Amino acid sequence: MIDHRSLLANFPLSALARLQLARAFVLTGDKTQAQKNYQAFLALSKDADPDIPIMKEAKTEFSRLK
């Protein structure tokens, strides 16, 4: 999905794929790639409601990497 962004430009699963990829990089210990993908998720979701639980979780997870 991530490799074919033009197919999913505004589709929510594109952003969620970035979040899951970031989480996978955390599990493998690749902090740099995890941060990159958390930033991409947050950029894609910048207009989302900040009170949605997944947004809160992602922001918390991202802040732990800093």
Image (spheres, helix red, strand yellow):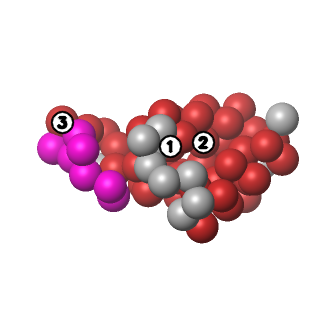
Distance of label 3 from label 1 (alpha carbons): 16 Å
Residue bearing mark 3: 6
Tell whether 2 sits left or right of 66: left
Residue at figure coordinates x 42%, y 41% from the top left: 47
Q: Are marks 2 and 1 in contact (CB under 8 Å)?
A: yes
Looking at the rendered structure, the kind of residue marked 3 is Ser
SS for callout 3: helix
Q: Is residue 28 above or below residue 65?
A: below
Q: Hey, which quadrant is residue 10 in on the image?
A: top left
Please give the range of residues in magenta: 7-13
Looking at the image, is mark 2 or mark 3 earlier in the sequence? 3
Find residue 38 and name its label.
Answer: 2
**Which numbered disc covers residue 41?**
1
Query: In the drawing, what numbered circle is on residue 62?
Result: none
How much space separates mark 2 and mark 1, taking CA atoms?
A: 5 Å
Label 2 packing within 10 angstroms: few (<14), some (14-19), many (20+):
many
Residue 62: x percent and y percent? 72, 45
Q: Position of residue 29 (x, y in %)?
A: 77, 48
- Would you say 61 lies left or right of 9 here? right
Q: Assign the C terminus to one quadrant of the image.
A: top right
Residue 8 is inside the magenta segment = yes
Q: Secondary structure at mark 2?
A: helix
10 drawn magenta: yes
Q: Amino acid at mark 2?
A: Tyr
